[in-house]
């Protein structure tokens, strides 16, 4: 799953530290989300969506892979 979290966060002028505090997660969690090393729980995805007042689908992009 890809996401636009870093792009959106920077557009809004929010640091990783500030977002982490608001969402009650570590700054490392935000960094891992932005780098694609970690997929959020559904609860965290909803918190991010509500904070930025955007649909989840505009932040997180699910890409299906074709199975042979």
Image (tube, rainbow, N blue to C red):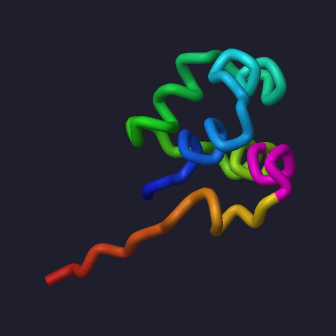
Where residue 47 appears, as percent x and y from the top left, is: 81, 44
Residue 20, horizontal then vertical, whole percent: 71, 22
Who's the residue at 70% across and 49% down the image? 45
Q: Quadrant of the N terminus?
A: bottom left
Q: Nearer the viewer, residue 44 or 34?
A: 34
With 27 as the anchor, is 49 left or right in this view? right
Position of 33 relative to 16 (above/below): below
Residue at point 70%, 62% (across, down): 56
6 left or right of 19 in image: left
Identified at 73% across, 27% down, the residue is 19
Question: Vertically, is 14 above or below 61?
Answer: above
Write the start and end of the magenta stretch as one range.
Answer: 48-53
Task: Give yes or no for residue 35 being in the magenta stretch.
Answer: no
Give the overall secondary structure of the magenta segment: helix
Q: Position of residue 31 (x, y in %)?
A: 50, 26
Left or right: where 62 falls relative to 27: left
Residue that protrudes farthest toward the left in the picture? 68
**Magenta span has 50?**
yes
Total numbered badges shown on the rendered structure: 0
The quarter holding residue 53 reads: bottom right
Q: Residue at x 24, y 80 (%)?
A: 66
Residue 39, how many percent across, how many down? 51, 45
Q: Which quarter of the rendering shows the C terminus?
A: bottom left
């Amino acid at each position: 799953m890809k996401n636009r979290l870093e792009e959106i966060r920077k557009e809004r002028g929010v640091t990783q530290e500030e977002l982490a505090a608001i969402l009650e997660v570590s700054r490392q969690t935000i960094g891992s989300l932005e780098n694609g090393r970690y997929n959020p729980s559904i609860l965290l995805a909803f918190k991010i969506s509500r904070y930025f007042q955007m649909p989840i689908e505009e932040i997180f992009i699910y890409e299906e892979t074709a199975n042979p």
